[in-house]
């Protein structure tokens, strides 16, 4: 990776880190923390879906696993919250690998793979809702005990910085993927699996690595969610709402790009908030906005917002506009 | 180097390849010709690991590779091109070739350097940063060749890399193929352009309806009655001979 690869990430991280010094409203900080948690999960989705071309409709399976693993470890086994965070992330990788092994080894792709991931998330949701071990329908409350050792802070800004650090680390991870052999092979598998195999790419291994990484990052976001709100139940942690958000954000922002998931999550949640301000009495107005933005993105910006910007820039430079396909890895 | 021993492939009721045997010594260019639907591509797919034979064995440098995965065979040094080109359409030409180069070069800088070198060699030097999806037919064929070459194969399987090219494009690419051979890469090529086969191949195999019907020097094989009949139909050899006698 060169300086040019890293500078945009560094600039963004520093600017975002300065925000709490300017903004002190707890509503705004709440909004930012939640949006960053969703961005992080969406970055996880993007590794598998964006770079690997394996669209998952069930990333809640990882989000929920991260949330439940840390909550259960803390509540039932008295494990420290930081250790819980590490173990939740590892559990996400493991669940990812297992789902990947079962589906990729039997050659599932495209809509079949999407449906299988959805099925896993739903099964986990139903199990978590039924079992007493996971708190059943009542859910789990992580004990309020505000101490940094417990990953609980009296200042919201500290949690914001923590989540921002993970988002930044994942931006760096994604950039590394984009510049590495692993990333090149992953993208090759997305574009044409047979051609990739002929060039010596072990497509099963590459996809398994991608889904394990993807599961780990999304589980981390689920764990941070549980740690921030200190409460989860099956419909929150394994609910389809999160599967949809994690998939929408990268598609809106720019699938297979480094910044796409973050841009998409900010756009979606920003618009959702604005809509709530103006039409707060209409229930589900933010979902209507999400749907509308998705339709616009699919109709007019196939590479998402970043793809659109890239095309406008190219046009501005008087270059011939390139087709829509290569816009998907415009990742500048 | 390569030994295909009594290999068959059945697609339902159709014997696409029927007990075909073929063997290659290191170095040189060997042709594989035959009418449409003879099973040539199917045989390539079995050698490169994309289709499992119904019967028979395949050995490469003394090792039985019959049930090995395609990527393992690529690691061993078997490179192939696809008759129906399979570019990574969303990537640039350079990125396409780099995927092949990454097989033996783990670092991005090395893989990219290798990709550029190979691109120049096959005449894609000016198109490095173009999206592969936007290449012409000739460009895509060159890209197939470049990607396979970037894996630094010992054995290169070329499936109709000249098809769809005009005569001047063919004239450009023939020296490239010869250059690859001169570097010590063994080449097995499927080709319908007979002028190129005559020009390049030291030896040819003829496949017809799944069976290997002839093998030998190109000129001798083309005069073989079985080969003429396979291409032109039953009785054609005799007819040609009669016509030849009438004109002579
Ligand atoms: N996957 C498949 N399933 C069923 N039949 C197939 C399959 N692949 C090839 N065939 C059939 O097997 C036969 C041999 O096909 P193959 O593509 O190997 O011929 P070929 O010699 O390469 O022909 P061409 O010169 O037209 O490329 C054909 O009759 C074809 O229709
Ligand atoms: Mg063929």
Image (cartoon, coloured by chain):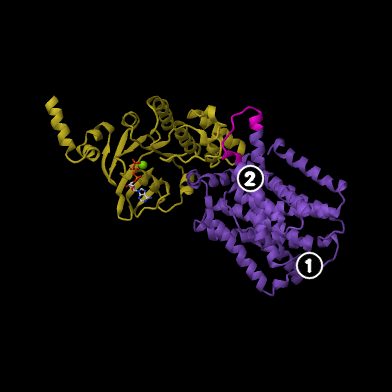
Chain colours: A purple, B yellow
Co-location on one chain, circles 2 and 1? yes
Q: Depth-wise, is mark 2 or mark 1 nearer the camera? A: 2
Above or below, A39 relative to A119: above
| Residue, far left | B246
* Up-down relation of residue B195 to residue A69 (above or below): above
Q: Any magenta on residue A323?
A: yes
Compared across the picture, whether B80 is left or right of A94 comes to left
- Dominant SS type (magenta): loop
For the residue labelled by badge 1, is the local secondary structure a helix, a strand or a loop?
loop
Counting from the top left corner in percent of width and height, residue A172 is at: 70, 45
Question: Label 2 lies in what chain?
Answer: A
> Residue beneath label 2, please?
A297
Is label 2's Cβ within 8 Å of ligand 1? no
Q: Residues within 10 Å of mark 1 (few under 14, many from 20)?
A: some
User: Secondary structure under badge 2?
Assistant: helix
Q: Is mark 1 within 8 Å of ligand 1?
A: no
Instruction: Tell me if I can see residue A226 in this picture.
Output: yes
Residue A52 placement (x, y as % from top left): 58, 49
Could you classify mark 2 by the number of other residues whose Cα lies within 10 Å: few (under 14), some (14-19), or many (20 or more)? some
Q: Could you tell me which quadrant the N terminus of chain A lies in? A: top right
Residue under label 1: A142
Which residue is more in the foreground, A299 or B161? Answer: A299
**Residue A30 placement (x, y as % from top left):** 81, 55
A96, above or below B48, in the image: below
Q: Which mark is residue B174?
A: none
Quarter-of-image position of residue A221: bottom right
x, y percentage for residue A258?
67, 44
In the rendered image, the quadrant that contains the C terminus of chain A is top right
Residue range in magenta is: A313-327
Q: Could you tell whether B5 is left or right of B177 in the image? A: left
Tally of numbered tags: 2
């Amino acid at each position: 990776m060169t300086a040019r690869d890293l500078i945009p990430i560094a600039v963004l991280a520093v600017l975002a880190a300065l925000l709490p010094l300017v903004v002190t409203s707890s509503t705004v900080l709440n909004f930012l923390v939640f949006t960053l948690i969703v961005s992080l999960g969406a970055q996880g989705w993007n590794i598998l879906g964006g770079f690997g071309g394996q669209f998952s409709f069930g990333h809640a399976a990882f989000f929920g696993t991260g949330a439940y693993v840390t909550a259960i470890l803390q509540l039932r086994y008295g494990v420290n919250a930081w250790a819980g965070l590490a173990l939740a992330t590892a559990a996400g990788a493991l669940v990812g690998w297992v789902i990947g092994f079962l589906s990729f080894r039997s050659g599932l792709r495209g809509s079949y793979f999407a449906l299988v991931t959805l099925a896993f998330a739903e099964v986990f949701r139903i199990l978590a809702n039924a079992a007493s071990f996971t708190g059943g329908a009542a859910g789990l409350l992580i004990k309020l005990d505000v101490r940094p050792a417990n990953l609980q802070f009296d200042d919201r800004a500290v949690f914001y910085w923590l989540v921002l650090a993970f988002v930044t680390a994942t931006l760096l991870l994604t950039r590394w993927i984009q510049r590495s052999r692993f990333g090149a092979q992953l993208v090759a598998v997305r574009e044409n699996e047979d051609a990739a195999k002929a060039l010596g790419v072990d497509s099963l291994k590459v996809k398994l690595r991608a889904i394990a990484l993807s599961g780990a990052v999304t589980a981390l976001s689920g764990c941070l969610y549980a740690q921030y709100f200190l409460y989860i139940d099956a419909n929150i942690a394994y609910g389809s709402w999160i599967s949809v958000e994690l998939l929408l954000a990268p598609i809106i922002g720019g699938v297979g790009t480094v910044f796409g998931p973050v841009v998409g999550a900010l756009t979606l949640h920003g618009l959702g908030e604005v809509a709530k301000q103006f039409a707060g009495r209409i229930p589900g107005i933010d979902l209507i906005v999400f749907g509308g933005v998705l339709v616009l993105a699919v109709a007019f910006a196939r590479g998402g917002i970043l793809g659109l910007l890239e095309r406008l820039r190219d046009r501005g430079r008087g270059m011939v506009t390139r087709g829509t396909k290569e816009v998907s890895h415009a990742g500048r | 180097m390569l030994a295909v021993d009594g290999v068959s492939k059945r697609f339902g009721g159709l014997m696409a390849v029927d007990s075909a045997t073929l063997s290659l010594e290191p170095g040189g260019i060997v042709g594989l010709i035959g009418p449409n639907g003879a099973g040539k591509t199917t045989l390539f797919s079995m050698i490169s690991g994309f289709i499992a034979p119904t019967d028979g064995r395949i050995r490469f440098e003394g090792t039985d590779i019959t049930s090995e995965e395609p990527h393992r065979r690529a690691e061993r040094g078997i490179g192939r091109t696809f008759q129906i080109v399979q570019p990574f359409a969303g990537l640039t030409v350079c990125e396409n070739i780099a995927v092949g180069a990454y097989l033996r070069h783990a670092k991005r800088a090395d893989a990219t350097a290798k990709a550029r070198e190979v691109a120049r060699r096959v005449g894609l030097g000016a198109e490095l940063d173009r999206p592969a999806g936007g290449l012409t037919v000739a460009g895509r064929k060159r890209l197939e060749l470049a990607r396979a070459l970037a894996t630094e194969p010992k054995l290169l399987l070329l499936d109709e890399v000249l098809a769809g090219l005009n005569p001047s494009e063919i004239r450009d690419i023939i020296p490239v193929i010869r250059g690859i051979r001169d570097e010590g890469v063994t080449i097995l090529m499927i080709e319908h352009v007979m002028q190129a086969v005559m020009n390049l191949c030291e030896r040819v195999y003829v496949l017809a309806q799944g069976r290997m019907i002839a093998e030998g020097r190109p000129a001798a094989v083309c005069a073989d009655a079985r080969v003429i009949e396979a291409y032109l139909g039953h009785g054609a050899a005799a007819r040609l001979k009669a016509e030849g006698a009438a004109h002579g």
